[in-house]
Image (cartoon, helix red, strand yellow):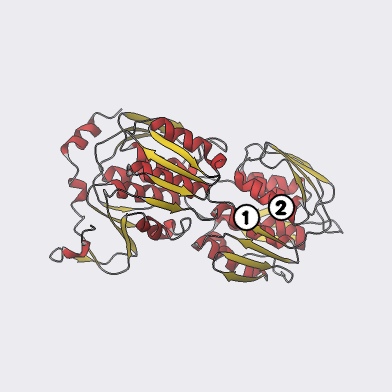
Amino acid sequence: MCSNMSSVATMKRKVLPPHLEVNGGHSLNGILKVSGAKNSSLVLMAAALLTKETVLINNVPQLTDIEVMSEILRNLGAKITKNSNSLEINSNCIHNAELPYQLVHSLRASFFCIGPLLARLGAAKIPLPGGCNIGARPIDEHINGLKALGAEVEIHNDLVKAQISAKNKRLRGANINLKYPSVGATETILMASCLALGKTTISNAAREPEIQDLAKMLNSMGAKVSGAGTSRITITGVEALKGTFHSVIPDRIEAGTFLIAAAITRSSLLVGPLIPSHLSAVISKLQECGCLISHHGNHYLKIIPTEISGVDITTSPFPGFPTDLQAPFMSLMTTAKGSSKIKEKVFEKRMQHVIELKKMGACIYLEKNTAYIKGVKKLIGSTVEGGDLRSSAAIVLACLSAKGESIITGLEHLDRGYERLEEKLTNVGSCISRKYDQLTSHHSFSSKAINKDNINTQKNAA
C-alpha cells in the first residue's frame, strides 16, 4: 500500500510548484502502453505546411511541445482541429512567414518550419530556436543545406532570415553532404527539397526512424523520396503535394524508458506497441546487463529482469545507443551489481541528472562527458529536480526504485515528452501522483539519509 505522504503534518511546510510525489520500492506488473513518437509528430506537423490540402495525423501524443507547435502553425495561418490523439491540419491559407519569438524560444523543433515556409512562400523569418539546455546544437548544417538549395540566408540579432530570389520562387535540387548526420538538418533539407526543381541527394544523412516516418508521410503526399533510413537520401522535386492521412510511429524513447523502468524496479512488464528494430541497441544492452526480453506478437516486448550487472554504453546516432536514453540507463546502472561507464558523445551538456542521482545515494564520478558508476544496494528517496526532458525521466525511474518517499519538481520538462506518465505508471502498480498544493518539506534531511554503505562506496569510486 502507498503511504500517506501528507501525514507528516508536524513538519515545516512550504510551497512548491507542481510536483510528483513518489513512494518507491514497489514491484510493477501489467502493460505499459507506448504513445506516438513526439519527435516524429513535431516534424510531421511542420511537413503539413507543404500542401494546401488537409493532412490528418493520427497517434499524436498530448504533450506541451505538441501544443506549442500547434500554436506556431496557427500563427502562420494554418487551421488545426484536434480530436484526442489526432490532428487535422489545413495550411491552405498560410500567409505569415515569420514565427513568434516566445513560441520558438521554447521549442527547438519549431525551426523545422523554415524548409516548408521557404518552399511554399519563398521566404521565412525564424528566431534561433530554444528547447532543453543540453549543449550546443548548431543549425549550421540546416543553413548550409538551404543555401545549397538556392536560398539566401542570413542571421542577424538571433533572427534567421531566408528567402528565394529566383523569379519562380522555387528552390533547386543539389548534392548535399552533411558534416554530421544531424537529424534536424536531414529533416529540414528533406522537406525543403520536396518542392524544389530537380533532384537532391543528402549524403551522410541521419538514419533515425523519425526520418523514415517523415519520408513515408511525404511520399503519401506525392513526394518522391527514396533511401530514407540509409545514409544517402534522394529526393526528386514535384510541383505540388496533396493531403494525406498518416499514423505516427510508436515513441521508441518512451518505449525504451518503460523497458528500463521494468529493469530498475526488477519487475516483469509488457511494453508496447513498439517497433523492436527501433530499439535494437537498447534491447541488446538490457539483455547484456541481465534482462530476459521476448517478443509478444509484432509490437510488444516482455521484459523479465534477473540480477542486474553493470555494462558500459557510448551514445551515438541511430542505430547506436540513443542519447535520449543515456540518462534513464544511468539510473539503472546506479542500482546494478559492479561498475559501469557511460560516455555521452552526442550532446556535451547531457549529464544534468548526475547531481540529482547522487542526492539519492548514487555513486557516480563524472569526468567531462563520461560517467563512472559503481552500483549501490539501494537508492534513497529525496527531493530532486529535473533539468531537462530526459534527465527528468531518469529521475522518475530512480525514484520508483528508491527506498522511501521522493519529491520531483521541474515537471515542465517531463511534460514535454511523456504523455500521462504518472497515470501509466500508476496503472502498473507505481505509487506516484501529481500534486499542486503545499508540500511538507520532510525531505530536507534526505541528503543526510544516505546509508553508510553508500557513502563508503562513493569514497571508493573510480
* The quarter of the displayed image where residue 47 is located: bottom right
Element assignment for label 1 = helix
Q: Position of residue 395 (x, y in %)?
A: 35, 49
In this rendering, would 283 be left or right of 330? right
Question: Does label 2 or label 1 sit earlier along the sequence?
Answer: 1
In the image, which disc is placed on residue 191?
2
In the image, which disc is placed on residue 153?
none
- What's the amino acid at mark 2? Met
**The furthest residue to the left:** 10
* The quarter of the displayed image where residue 430 is located: bottom left
Q: Position of residue 289 (x, y in %)?
A: 39, 32
Element assignment for label 2 = helix
Q: Position of residue 394 (x, y in %)?
A: 38, 47
Q: CA distance from mark 2 to mark 1?
A: 9 Å
Q: Is disc 2 surrounded by few (<14), some (14 to 19) or many (20+) residues within 10 Å?
A: many
- What's the amino acid at mark 1? Val
Residue appearing at x 24%, y 50% in the figure: 381
Task: Quadrant for the C terminus, please.
Answer: top left
Q: Position of residue 42 (x, y in %)?
A: 59, 57
Do labels 2 and 1 touch, CB within 8 Å? yes
Residue appearing at x 44%, y 43% in the figure: 302
Front residue (pair 230, 136): 230
Query: Which residue position holds label 1?
Result: 43
